[in-house]
Every structure is written in C-alpha cells, then in structure tokens.
Image (cartoon, rainbow, N blue to C red):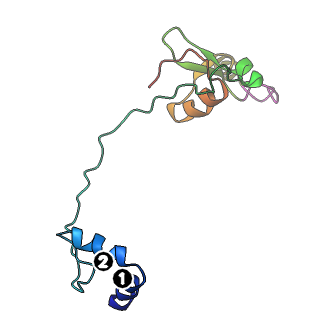
Amino acid sequence: MAMMLQACTLATPSVVSLASSFKGLSLKSTTSVSFSAIQVKPAASRKLVVQPVAAAGYKLKSHKASAKRFGVTGSGKITRRCAGRAHLLRKKSTKRKNRLAGKTEVKHCDWQNVIGALPYLKTKKQ
C-alpha cells in the first residue's frame, strides 16, 4: 500500500499538498486505522401502512376480477366467499352447505395481496 501511495504522490504533486492539509490522516503513514464497533438496536415493531402510489395525474387500476370477489365491512375488514360450495355438493351435509354459503374474513397475512389488486378499497389500515 505504501508503494501505491508513493506512486500516487509522485504522479500528482497536488495530492501531497492536499494530504498535508489533513492533520488527522497522513497518506504516508503505514499504521493501521482501527474503528470502534457500531451497535445497532433492533427497530421497534412497525405497522406497515400501504397507500396507493402513482405518478401525478394517473390513477391506479383496480383488478376487476378481484373487485367482484372481495368486499369491505363497515368496520373496514375485507371479506370473501367461503370456498367449497361450487360443486360436489351431494356428499356435503345441509349444515355444512349453509355454513359455506356465508362470507368470511380475509386473514391479515393476505391483506397486502388484496390491497395490491384493489388500491382504492376502503379498508382499515392495520
């Protein structure tokens, strides 16, 4: 490293004058520089807030197939239809078919997928 620095100083005399202006760091020094360890504290749990982002003057498009399948309750929760009531109903009991006829809430782990497809859905951000 010292040879590289000497080659640099020989090639450009302005580097020598610039190096002499720094009092704390000498380019001719061969001593190693030590740094103290930086401790990074883990960030507190943050809630992710997703908002529609588009260039000025443009609206984001909603995925129309998703718009027909998902809805929002008055409290801001996303709802969907229950799966398993489209076909093969002969072997299912009446109680089970009635239970599957209703709507159910979308789990929070799937909210980002639904909000990505429907950016203007009036949900309660969590």
Rendered location of residue 39, percent (x, y): 23, 58
The residue closer to the viewer here, 111 or 53, is 53
Total of numbered circles in the picture? 2
Q: Say which residue label 2 marks.
A: 16
Residue at x 60% of width, y 17% of height: 121
Q: Residue furthest top?
A: 74
Residue 90 magenta-drawn?
Answer: yes
Q: Amino acid at mark 1?
A: Thr
Q: Is residue 124 above or below residue 50?
A: above
Highlighted range, magenta = 84-92
Q: Residue furthest left?
A: 23
Residue 27: mark in rendering: none
Q: Say which residue label 1 marks.
A: 9
Among numbered discs 2 and 1, the one appearing first in the sequence: 1
Rendered location of residue 79, percent (x, y): 60, 19
Q: Where, quadrant-wise, is the N terminus in this rendering?
A: bottom left
Label 2, label 1: how far apart the Cα atoms are: 6 Å
Q: Answer left or right for 72 relative to 98.
A: left
Overall secondary structure of the magenta stretch?
A: loop
Q: Decide: marks 2, 1 in contact (CB < 8 A)?
A: yes
Q: Answer left or right for 22 relative to 46.
A: left
Corner quadrant of residue 16 = bottom left
The residue closer to the viewer here, 84 or 103, is 103
Residue at x 33% of width, y 39% of height: 45
Corner quadrant of residue 126 = top left
Q: Amino acid at mark 2?
A: Val
SS of the residue under disc 2: helix
